[in-house]
Image (cartoon, rainbow, N blue to C red):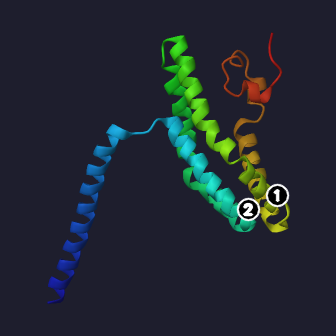
């Protein structure tokens, strides 16, 4: 009898998992026709971050933790959306259409930033006035800075012949070349 009980639980698990996969697969197939542009996905992340900042303005320590968690959970998606936005724009062959698409992306990405500017300021003020939240945020930013320094260092200045092609050239040497 115990064996039959295990078998029925096992079958229940298989049915639930298989059903979930079928529903997910069907839903994803249906979503392909309404798939959002990468700049729209990035803008949605920025709106989500605004919600985090809004909560963080009330409780800064929790806000800092949520902010870091959001970047940890969604940072790769955000970077992918940003990169895909650049590729989407650069694949437009006609210069006028290219520029128009870039302006659309700029509007989509900047809108949530502008709409949330006051909220971000309230969050920054709350963090600044909470030593524990301020320390946690500073520790996270410093650690990220260390990671970037380890990864990139001053490679943009020392590699000969590839400086003009380096996407980090302007970040490392912001003086315009003439």
Q: Which residue is mark 1?
A: 125
Q: Quadrant of residue 105?
A: top right
* Depicted 91 relative to depicted 14: above or below: above
Q: Going by the image, does 19 lie left or right of 168?
A: left
Q: Residue at x 67, y 23 (%)?
A: 166
Q: Going by the image, does 147 lie left or right of 70?
A: right
Residue 108 at x, y = what percent? 57, 36
Q: Residue at x 62, y 52 (%)?
A: 49
Specify the farthest residue to the top.
Answer: 178
The one nearer the camera, 123 or 20, is 123
Quadrant in the picture for the C terminus? top right
* Depicted 151 relative to depicted 45: above or below: above
Q: Secondary structure at mark 1?
A: helix
Dot 1 surroundings within 10 Å: few (below 14), some, or many (20 or more)? Answer: some
Q: Residue at x 78, y 64 (%)?
A: 133
Q: Quadrant of residue 83?
A: top right
The tally of labels here is: 2
The first of marks 2 and 1 along the sequence is 2
* Depicted 87 relative to depicted 43: above or below: above
Residue 34 at x, y = what percent? 36, 40
Q: Going by the image, does 47 lie left or right of 30?
A: right
Q: Residue at x 56, y 55 (%)?
A: 73
Q: Secondary structure at mark 2?
A: helix
Quadrant in the picture for the N terminus? bottom left
Whether the residues at callouts 2 and 1 have beta carbons within 8 Å, the answer is yes
Query: Residue 57, which numbered label?
Result: 2
The answer to whether residue 163 is visible is yes
């Amino acid at each position: 009898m115990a064996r039959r009980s295990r078998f029925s639980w096992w079958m229940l698990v298989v049915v639930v998992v298989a059903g979930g996969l079928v529903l997910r697969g069907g839903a994803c197939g249906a979503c392909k026709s309404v798939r959002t542009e990468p700049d729209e996905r990035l803008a949605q992340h920025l709106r989500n971050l605004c919600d985090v900042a809004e909560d963080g303005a009330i409780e800064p320590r929790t806000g800092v933790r949520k902010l870091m968690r959001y970047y940890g959970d969604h940072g790769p998606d955000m970077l992918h959306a940003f990169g895909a936005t650049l590729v989407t724009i650069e694949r437009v062959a006609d210069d006028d259409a290219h520029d128009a698409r870039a302006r659309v992306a700029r509007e989509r990405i900047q809108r949530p930033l502008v709409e949330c500017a006051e909220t971000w300021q309230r969050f920054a003020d709350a963090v600044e006035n909470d030593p524990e939240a301020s320390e946690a945020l500073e520790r996270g930013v410093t650690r990220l800075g260390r990671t970037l320094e380890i990864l990139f260092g001053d490679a943009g200045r020392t590699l000969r012949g590839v400086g003009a092609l380096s996407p980090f050239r302007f970040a490392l040497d912001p003086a315009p070349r003439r």
